[in-house]
Amino acid sequence: MENFDQLLDKYANLLIEKGINVEKGDNVMIYIAVDQAPLAHYLAKHAYENGARRVHFTWKDDFTNRLNYEYQATEDLAEVADYTVARQEDLILNQKISRLSIVSGDPDLLNGIDPSKIDTVQTSHGTALKVVRTATMNDRVKWTVAAAADYGWAKHVFPELAEDKQAATDALWDAIFKASRVYEADPVEAWNNHRDLLDEKAKFLNDKQFKKLHYTAPGTDFTVGLPENHIWMSAQSFNPDGSPFIANMPTEEVFTAPDTNVMDGYVTSTKPLSYAGSTIEGIKVTFADGKIVDVTADKGAQIMKDLVFNNEGAQGLGEVALVPHKSPISQSNLTFFNTLFDENASNHIAIGAAYPTTVQGGTEMSDEELQAAGVNRSHVHVDFMIGSDKMDIDAIDADGNIFPIFRQGEWAF
Amino acid sequence: MENFDQLLDKYANLLIEKGINVEKGDNVMIYIAVDQAPLAHYLAKHAYENGARRVHFTWKDDFTNRLNYEYQATEDLAEVADYTVARQEDLILNQKISRLSIVSGDPDLLNGIDPSKIDTVQTSHGTALKVVRTATMNDRVKWTVAAAADYGWAKHVFPELAEDKQAATDALWDAIFKASRVYEADPVEAWNNHRDLLDEKAKFLNDKQFKKLHYTAPGTDFTVGLPENHIWMSAQSFNPDGSPFIANMPTEEVFTAPDTNVMDGYVTSTKPLSYAGSTIEGIKVTFADGKIVDVTADKGAQIMKDLVFNNEGAQGLGEVALVPHKSPISQSNLTFFNTLFDENASNHIAIGAAYPTTVQGGTEMSDEELQAAGVNRSHVHVDFMIGSDKMDIDAIDADGNIFPIFRQGEWAF
């Protein structure tokens, strides 16, 4: 790829400047794979140049992660030491650490590993490290999730290039750079404009304060409530000091919390879901009396059942997100097997916890108060995609009036 | 390099099988640079295949390490959190973790950084993580230090290849594989034979129980005592359960503790010392009344002065090691700018702590008892090289008889 180093530098600058928005004195934690060291180096350089006080790294490695699952006993792998919790508490509560997660790697990494082992390990870590989840979901620290390309991932997105490692990896970098607006002359300015457009949609919906959404599409007929004083959010978030950041890069969505007590009908997934190191396809979720009562899938069904029925709060929903079918990522016609991208090509909903930021005063509420307000609590949050060019969505207001929100997969207002 | 993958696999197997000797149920920690992931993967695979319970990694990264020194305040960089100490204590005391350190990287990484900043940071970490040092120096856990090649290091060893990254890196791998006997048909068997040869020298010296050594060479005229019941050690060590391991790969030395109270004269270094991210050359150390009273150096003098005069116990010596000038590493005529190699090409001594394993009952003694026995205590241990083909060493026994130990840099018995 021509000018790859310059593009990587530009991308790193965008993530540091506009993503987590590193400011003077910030502590920064970067989660990144060992084979992404070139990107890591640009990120560290830009973070320090922006005045970071400390830049920490948590290095990930797919190959040894898979070996750990293959060889370690479940209880060893699931164990979270007190000092690990203490460290995360210090980073979050004292250092107010800005968290940049770079996702990469083979979406099928853990294929063939016992799903209940994966579930036990993820549940244990999710529960023990609640402080991290709480901080990000409440925007108590600045945080960004972005992506990096590698062959293990690229061969799924570009199967026709699977024989040529370099070509496949370059094609995925190209797709990431496009979706993240890195090719723009001034990517930061391009993101400001994009943010403003999404904000307009969110403002319209916030002013309306609809009571319910009704989704229809082949395989989907689903009604979901919206809590009182819900807030539709878009690209930009703010930490408690009022510093802006972009939590997902790319992002094309406008989203809020559903009222988890008001859910009826069924939905069918329209894109593969990459979760817990496996690809799950053809998910059908049935709701009754305000909770998920059944889950099936053409592939990976057991992982979905474990997710929904073995985790507290996972029979509830935590997010409804609106993304036009003609979003730039959707227009690429690629399936990324990665939620960060696939959710931004499609309307989606999330199993598990809602963001307390999506209701007025939510970040000041206890878990009990949030749950009472219909804002679901859980230690999991897993998005899956239900949008298509055949999806219509109606909104229903307090007086029973119906407003078309989406028609044939596109904004209707 | 032809068959590089097979050689790397063979090397990893040697380090796991013969180096730290991973046995069923062992917990393993591997310290390795992110750009050595291919070696890391082979190491993890062999460790698990040998029955390891858990394999942890501590990933290192030169580039961001240097940025940390450039941008972070000394007190931030020197800080060691309680939970970091707690983790090391758990790994060492509870998990009895086997430690494999893979050294690599540019020996001049920290060139230009204020030496007192480096010293403050290293002293702070060394003091806080005493549990790790104590465990390894007493062989309470199995541990191995070995090497991996990268361009940042290779360009110093092969300056004539500095323009060709791949050629320089390959040349260094070749030198590492040679010194580690990886090209042998059965490297494990080759190491068994090598260990037996070194054991013979150690046995002779142990039976003699000399009182003093007297070194002479250009720039060196130095007399040092040996403590009562000292033990000359060689390649193989044993953990408290009697499991053997090889602490250094390569190793060509036979070594023991000096009596730190009996040191007189002066020594001059014969090879560069890579320490604290800098290369130090032309070191001259003067002893009087059983301690170092002066240190000069042609290059990096301040780092040496800080080491000796700012660290408790660093005016004492912790090791005298005998290595024939014609050792295989010496015969390569290469200067590695890395102590693991350069110390095994040359007689050397170490500033700082002695290994309690080098006196009878030493691992059961308190720091005070060791110090009283002449076995130096400190939180530093830095070897530097004084051997050459012009070095003679005499041993002096309890009756004042003189035995030639080395003549013209070679064993004299």
Image: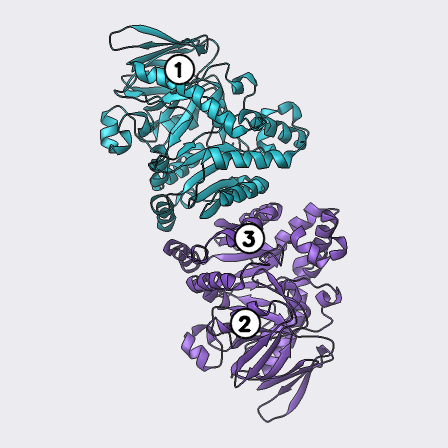
Chain colours: A cyan, B purple
- First in sequence: mark 2 vs mark 3: 3
Which of the numbered marks, if any, corresponds to residue B305?
2
Mark 1 vs mark 3, foreground winner is: 3
Query: What residue lies at 52% left-to-right and 73% top-to-bottom?
Result: B308
Q: Position of residue B259 (x, y in %)?
A: 53, 82
The quarter of the picture where the N terminus of chain A appears is: top right
Residue type at numbered disc 3:
Arg
Q: Kindly indicate the quadrant of the structure image that contains residue B251.
A: bottom right
Q: Chain of mark 2?
A: B
Rounded to the nearest angstrom, the CA distance separating label 2 from label 3 is: 22 Å
Dot 1 corresponds to which residue?
A267
How many neighbours does mark 2 have within 10 angstroms: few (below 14), some (14-19), or many (20 or more)? some
The quarter of the picture where the C terminus of chain A appears is: top left
A208 or A153, which is in the foreground?
Answer: A208
Q: Chain of mark 1?
A: A
How many neighbours does mark 3 have within 10 angstroms: few (below 14), some (14-19), or many (20 or more)? some
Residue type at numbered disc 2:
Lys
Rounded to the nearest angstrom, the CA distance separating label 1 from label 3 is: 52 Å
In the displayed structure, A234 sits above or below B389; it is above
Image-based side of B404 in relation to A311, left or right: right
Residue type at numbered disc 1:
Val
Which of the numbered marks, if any, corresponds to residue B66?
3
Image-based side of A122 in relation to B249, left or right: left
> Judging from the image, what secondary structure is the residue with disc 2 in?
helix
Q: Kindly indicate the quadrant of the structure image that contains residue A115.
A: top left
